[in-house]
C-alpha cells in the first residue's frame, strides 16, 4: 500500500520512524456529469470572477475571507513559519482506556507501518505495551496543513491510528431528543430485549452494500445494450407505528423465523422464551339484541310473545278500570240518595 505521510512516533525519548497508510477505501460507484444531448463530459474550469479568465493551477493561491468579503492572502511560506512541533511527528501525549473515547470523535483511520529495519524493535515494543496495558494512546500530529488529534490502538499485529475530532468540534445534541413525555412499560422493554437478543448476533463479514451491487448490475446491463432493466419491487421499510406491542411481537417472530427458530423458542439453549401478554383493548358495552325480522310470512316468536303480553295487560287494565268505574258509580248513586233525603222537609204535626 502506498504511504501518504512519512514521519515518526514520539514515545517519550523513543522515536519510531513510520509510514502512514490509509486503512479504508471508498468503494462507492462514482458517476461523471455529461451533456444529455450528445453525451459529452462536463468539466469545471477555475475562472477568476474579476476578469472572467481561466486560471491555471500554478497561479491559484489561498486566502481567508472575512465577514465583509475581504480576502486576506495566506501563503505557504506564512504557514511554514508557524510553530508546529507535530509537522513530521506523531507525538503521544497520554495513555487512556478506550472507553474514554467518544465514538462521535472518530474520523479517518490509518495504519502505521515501521519505516525500515531499525524501526522494527521500537515499533514492536510500543505495540506490545498497548496490548498488555489494554489502553490506547492519545497523540497529536499534523496532516494536510493542520494539527490533528489521533488515537493509536492495536489491530492484529499492526498499530492503527484513528483521526479524532477536537472536543470543540462535537456539537451538543440540543433540541434533538423527543420533547414529549413518554412512559415505556416493562412489557415493551421485555419485547425490545427479546428482539435485541434475536438480532444481536451477526457476522460482520457477511454484510454488504446491496445498493452498490444493484448499481453495478444496472451498469453491466446498460453496457450490454439492454434498453430496459427490470427493477426489483421495493420493500416497505418502516412506517407509522400504531400498536407498539404488536410491532415488537411481529418483529421478534419474524427475526426468529429468519434464523430458523420456532416462534416460541428462546434464542439460546437453556433460556426461557420471553413471553409478554399485550393489554386487551377496551370492551364496548353489549348492545341489546335486535328483534328478528319476519321470515316467510310468519311472525317471530318474540313478536308474538310481546303481543300476547300486551293484550293480557290491556285486558287486565280494562277489567280493573271497569270495576273502579262501577264502584265510583255506586258511590255517586248513594250520595245522590242521601242528598235527596236530606233535602226533603219534614211534615209538622197539626
Image (cartoon, rainbow, N blue to C red):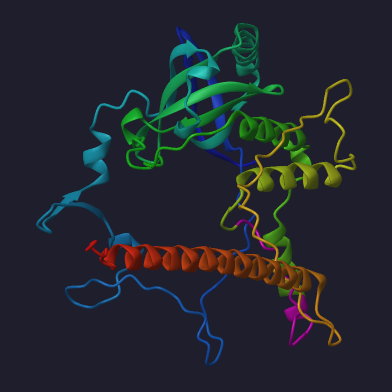
Location of residue 18 with respect to 340 vertically, above or below: above
Specify the quadrant of the image occupied by residue 109. top right
The residue segment tinted magenta is 221-238
Determine whether 8 is above or below 260 in the image.
Answer: above
Q: Give the answer, above or below, for where 39 lies relative to 55.
A: below
Tell me the quadrant of the picture where the C terminus can be found: bottom left
Instruction: List x then y, in percent, for residue 164.
Output: 44, 31
Magenta stretch: residue 227 in it? yes
Q: Residue drawn at (63%, 47%), measured in percent from left and top?
A: 281
Determine the residue positioned at 25% across, 77% down: 53
Where residue 116 sits in the image (x, y, percent)? 62, 23
Image position of 288 with respect to 84: above or below: below
The N terminus lies in quadrant: top right
Query: Can residue 232 be seen in this snapshot?
Result: no
Residue nearer the viewer, 147 or 199: 199
Residue 60 in sight here: yes
Please name the predominant secondary structure of the magenta segment in the image. Answer: loop
Q: Is residue 256 magenta?
A: no
The percent position of residue 9, horizontal first and vertical second, equals 49, 19
Percent from the top left, x then y, of residue 11? 48, 12
Q: Nearer the viewer, residue 81 or 222?
A: 222
State which quadrant residue 291 falls in: bottom right
Viewer-closest of 186 and 211: 186
Position of 138 with respect to 46 (left or right) is right
Answer left or right for 124 relative to 18: right
Residue at 68% in and 35% down: 191
Q: Residue at x 30, y 74 (%)?
A: 54
299 sits left or right of 23 in the view: right
Amino acid at each position: 500500500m502506498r504511504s501518504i505521510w512519512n514521519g515518526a512516533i514520539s514515545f517519550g525519548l523513543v522515536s519510531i520512524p513510520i509510514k502512514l497508510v490509509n486503512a479504508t477505501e471508498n468503494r462507492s460507484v462514482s458517476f461523471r456529469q455529461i451533456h444529455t444531448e450528445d453525451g459529452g463530459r462536463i468539466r469545471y474550469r477555475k475562472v477568476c470572477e474579476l476578469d472572467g479568465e481561466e486560471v491555471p493551477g500554478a497561479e491559484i493561491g489561498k486566502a481567508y475571507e472575512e465577514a465583509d468579503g475581504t480576502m486576506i492572502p495566506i501563503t505557504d511560506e506564512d504557514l511554514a513559519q508557524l510553530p508546529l512541533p507535530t509537522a513530521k511527528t506523531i507525538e503521544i501525549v497520554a495513555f487512556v482506556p478506550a472507553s474514554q473515547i467518544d465514538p462521535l470523535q472518530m474520523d479517518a483511520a490509518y495504519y502505521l507501518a515501521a519505516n525500515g529495519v531499525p524501526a522494527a524493535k521500537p515499533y514492536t515494543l510500543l505495540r506490545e505495551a498497548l496490548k498488555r496495558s489494554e489502553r490506547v494512546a492519545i497523540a497529536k500530529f499534523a496532516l494536510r496543513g493542520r494539527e490533528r488529534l489521533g488515537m493509536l490502538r492495536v489491530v492484529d499485529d499492526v498499530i492503527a491510528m484513528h483521526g479524532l475530532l477536537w472536543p470543540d468540534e462535537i456539537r451538543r445534541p440540543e433540541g434533538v431528543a423527543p420533547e414529549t413525555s413518554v412512559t415505556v412499560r416493562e412489557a415493551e422493554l421485555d419485547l425490545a430485549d427479546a428482539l435485541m437478543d434475536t438480532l444481536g448476533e451477526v457476522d460482520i463479514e457477511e454484510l454488504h452494500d446491496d445498493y452498490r451491487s444493484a448499481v453495478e448490475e444496472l451498469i453491466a446491463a446498460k453496457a450490454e445494450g439492454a434498453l430496459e432493466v427490470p427493477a426489483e419491487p421495493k420493500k416497505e421499510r418502516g412506517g407509522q407505528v400504531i400498536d407498539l406491542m404488536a410491532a415488537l411481537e411481529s418483529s421478534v417472530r419474524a427475526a426468529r423465523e429468519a434464523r430458523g427458530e420456532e416462534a416460541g423458542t428462546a434464542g439460546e439453549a437453556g433460556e426461557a422464551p420471553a413471553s409478554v401478554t399485550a393489554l386487551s383493548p377496551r370492551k364496548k358495552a353489549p348492545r341489546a339484541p335486535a328483534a328478528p325480522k319476519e321470515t316467510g310470512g310468519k311472525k317471530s316468536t318474540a313478536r308474538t310473545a310481546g303481543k300476547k303480553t300486551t293484550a293480557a295487560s290491556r285486558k287486565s287494565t280494562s277489567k280493573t278500570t271497569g270495576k273502579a268505574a262501577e264502584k265510583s258509580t255506586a258511590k255517586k248513586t248513594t250520595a245522590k240518595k242521601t242528598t235527596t233525603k236530606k233535602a226533603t222537609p219534614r211534615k209538622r204535626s197539626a
